[in-house]
Image (cartoon, helix red, strand yellow):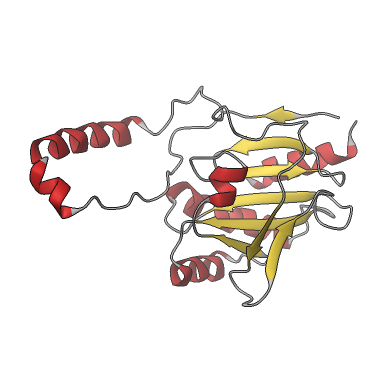
Amino acid sequence: MDSSTTTEPKGGAAPPASKPPWKALAIGGGIALFVAAIGVTSLLLGPRSSNTTASSGAVVPGQLAPQFILPSLMDPGQTVAVPADGGGHGKPAVLVFFASWCGPCQKEMPALAAAVSRGEAGNAAVLGIDGQDQPAAARAFVTRTGVTFPVGVDQTFAVVNGKYGFGYLPETVFINGSGIVTSVHYGATTPALLRQGVKAFSKG
């Protein structure tokens, strides 16, 4: 099987940070300003350098894809899941990790969603995982960008970070019908990269 990973380019988006308590700001105002300055510098430089790969806990080709069940974003009462056999019924799966607040995701999704709608994912089950998002914003994003595949809500990053080890979005994971990760793409996925990942399912 031809397994591969790609490096994460600059511009990946980290999840929104929680606001610190006002008491802490009052006590440590000078420290907060210093930290803020560091944060601005970090944003200018990008969350990761262009030659870095996933964190040590991230999924890698060759391993069994972590299983999960998430509530559906667009179909209340339904779920979106990946069991041990890949897409759910012995067929491959493509997992698209994104969020409406993620800049690279906003650029990625229209073309990627259109490619999926054209059938460029072949017989793979394409599943979206929306991380740490506002439900209304996420639904509007999915509608606006033409997403037709099922999307699961990962409000706490339990799947994005906890099970798959990603700290930034977007990411795409390709899983064969046996539930094995065949490739992981860090950063925005183009239609060409989608076709490349799907093509690898038939190799090996």
Side of 152 where 18 appears, left or right? left
Q: Quadrant of the N terminus?
A: top right
Q: Nearer the viewer, residue 192 or 139?
A: 139
Q: Nearer the viewer, residue 59 or 146?
A: 59
**Residue at the bottom extreme?**
76
Q: Quadrant of the C terminus?
A: top right
Instruction: Determine if residue 45 is in view.
Output: yes
Residue 24 vs 135, above or below: the answer is: above
The residue lying at 48 percent from left, 26 percent from top is 50
The residue lying at 56 percent from left, 47 percent from top is 160
Side of 141 where 151 appears, left or right? right
Report x, y in % for residue 18: 32, 52
Residue 61 vs 29, above or below: the answer is: above
The residue lying at 21 percent from left, 53 percent from top is 21
Residue 140 vs 52, above or below: the answer is: below
**Residue 71 occupies which quadrant of the picture?**
bottom right
Report x, y in % for residue 129: 60, 56
Report x, y in % for residue 39: 26, 36
The residue lying at 89 percent from left, 34 percent from top is 203
Side of 130 where 30 appears, left or right? left
Side of 70 where 92 appears, left or right? right
**Residue 117 occupies which quadrant of the picture?**
bottom right
Report x, y in % for residue 133: 46, 60
Q: Nearer the viewer, residue 32 or 27?
A: 27
Instruction: Determine if residue 149 is in view.
Output: no
